[in-house]
Image (tube, grey):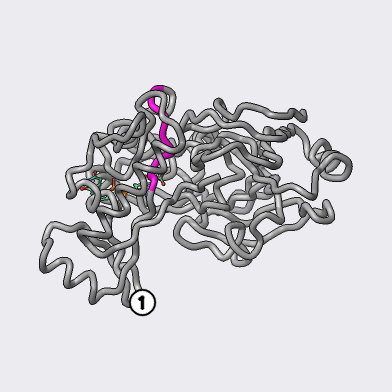
Amino acid sequence: MIRSNFSLLHYNTFGIDETAQLFFSFTTINELIEFLTNNFRKDLPFFVLGGGSNVLLTKPFAGTIIHPENTGIDIIEETDTEVFVKVAAGEIWDDFVQWAVEHNLHGVENLSYIPGCVGASPVQNIGAYGAEAKDSIYQVECLSVADVKKRIFNNTECKFGYRDSIFKHDEAGKYIVTHVVFRLLKHAPFNLEYGSLQNIDAATATLQTVRDTIIEIRKSKLPDPKEIGSAGSFFKNPVIPNEQAELLKNTYPNMVTYPAGDGFTKIAAGWLIDSLGLKGFSIGGAQVHPKQALVLTNKGGATSSDVVSLAKHIQQQVLDTYRITISPEVIYL
Ligand code: EPU
């Protein structure tokens, strides 16, 4: 389906009303191949928009939005210990996690209830509760926009990092993810190290109880996208040199920090923002979520400039007080 001047209101979880000059959605790979071969405007930029749960639309998009709606979760190979599952980019991420849990397969249960589509999971290397998509991704199948050829990236080639991959850098704007192949495990210890998961009894835990606990925690801290628009964590947790972190810790002993390896420390951006008393602070319709300072919400009628102004205000306050630059996790379009 190709549309012009198409409203993206229902295609971003922030609930911002901006348009796309061209909008194309596909349910089969053949439709995508046909579009790229015959109708794709190579003179304009394009952006692949999945669930729209990690973008901030800041202006009308003067290009093509490509929206995958292909579906399918298929076991393609199985050994005594592992199951390789090929999942279409347009599948809802949490439907896939539920499928894995129901099939008793380990690996993605800690990523329960993350909004968005499967196609975005390798691009952003989504993560939560001590797990990241990269731990389970075996390979990523793409179509190259330039020559409409299939290209497969294995896990190493994806150069995964914290909320990061090759698809945001060297290969940005060159490929459309069509499927992701996950390597799930038939047996594996549960990953219950993360703070609030430590209350789960590892001896009696099941994939379903881990999933249920995570859904409960997420629901208690994060706004329900069906009720309040947001894009999850708005900022990344900044990583700074250990020396700088130690100096800050002397002045602010309660600051939440995690070792990040190689002489670096990760700081909880939520703590930084919260410590400045910004929970509940708003500009226009954009608000810092009263229960989790890392999340910016649309409390009603927010424009993109409200959100951008709020984000800038927070960044400036954090910089002024802590000399730390925090950058958005959310992609500005
Ligand atoms: N904190 C505060 N005040 C706040 C928020 C957080 O003091 O308002 C403190 C918490 O008490 C905690 C620390 O900061 O000690 C970290 O907070 P939390 O455990 O809630 O995790 P986070 O760093 O805020 C990250 C991910 C989330 C993911 C959670 C759980 C990023 C940018 N965010 O958040 O991912 O769900 O960990 O693993 O890494 C997302 O990417 O959209 C997202 C929600």
Q: Is residue 232 magenta?
A: yes
Q: Is residue 122 above or below residue 207?
A: below
Q: Is residue 144 magenta?
A: no
In the rendered image, the vertical position of residue 159 relative to residue 298, given as above or below = below
Q: Residues within 10 Å of mark 1 (few under 14, many from 20)?
A: few
Q: Count up the numbered dots.
A: 1
Q: Specify the farthest residue to the right.
A: 38
Relative horizontal placement of residue 294, taking residue 303 as reference (left or right) = left
Give the overall secondary structure of the magenta segment. strand
Picture residue at 82% right of the left edge, 44% below the top? 36
Residue 171 falls left or right of residue 212: right
Percent position (x, y) of residue 259?
29, 67
**Left of 122 or right of it: where is 219?**
left
Left or right side of 206 for 126:
right
**Which residue appears at 83% of the width and 39% of the height?**
35
Closer to the camera in the image, 274 or 164:
274
From the image, which quarter does the N terminus lie in? top right
Image quadrant where residue 208 sits = top left
Q: Which amino acid, by three-letter code, is at mark 1?
A: Asp
Against 211, residue 7 (above or below) is above
Task: Tell me if residue 100 can be seen.
Answer: no
- Residue 320 rendering spot, x and y as whole percentages: 23, 59
What residue is shown with label 1?
Answer: 262
How far across and how far down the image is residue 150, in percent? 79, 53
Residue 118 can be seen in this image: yes
Q: Is residue 88 shown above or below 165?
A: above
Q: Position of residue 92 (x, y in %)?
A: 56, 34
Q: Secondary structure at mark 1?
A: loop
Residue range (magenta): 227-234
Is ligand 1 closer than 8 angstroms to the Cβ of mark 1? no
Question: Could you tell me which quadrant the C terminus lies in?
Answer: top right
Q: Residue at x 29, y 68 (%)?
A: 265
